[in-house]
Image: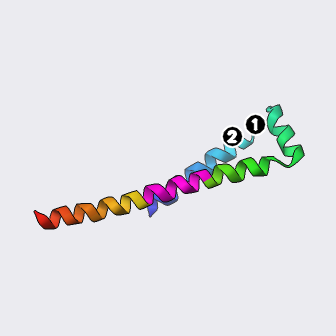
């Protein structure tokens, strides 16, 4: 659980550092149109899906490891 929390903190801190750069014209246009929130929501959904998939895969692998350890 500590690894997950550390990963999330690092991710949000790096996103904060990237968001401080105000020289990007496309981001300014998206922000004025209100579309930047759609982009952020899409990125969050994709990352959440990837994290869910990885945790589900890890859970299945642990079950397979337990089954193979019991057979041996």
Query: Which contiguous range is marked in magenta?
Result: 46-55
Q: What residue is rendered at 89% in x and 44% in y? A: 32
Viewed as shown, does residue 52 lie left or right of 18? left
Residue at the left extreme of this rendering: 72
Q: Give the secondary structure at mark 2.
A: helix
Residue at image mark 2: 18
- The quadrant in which residue 62 appears is bottom left
Viewed as shown, does residue 67 lie left or right of 31? left
Q: Give the secondary structure at mark 1.
A: loop
Vertical relation: 21 (above or below) 11: above
Q: What residue is rendered at 75% in x and 36% in y? A: 21
- The quadrant in which residue 70 appears is bottom left
Residue 38: percent from left, percent from top: 76, 51
Q: What residue is rendered at 44% in x and 55% in y? A: 54
Dominant SS in magenta: helix
Residue at image mark 1: 21
């Amino acid at each position: 659980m500590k690894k997950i929390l550390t990963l999330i903190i690092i991710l949000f801190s790096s996103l904060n550092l990237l968001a401080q750069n105000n020289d990007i014209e496309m981001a300014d246009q998206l922000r004025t149109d209100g579309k930047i929130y759609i982009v952020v929501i899409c990125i969050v959904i994709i990352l959440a899906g990837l994290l869910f998939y990885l945790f589900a895969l890890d859970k299945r692998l642990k079950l397979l490891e337990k089954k193979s350890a019991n057979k041996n």
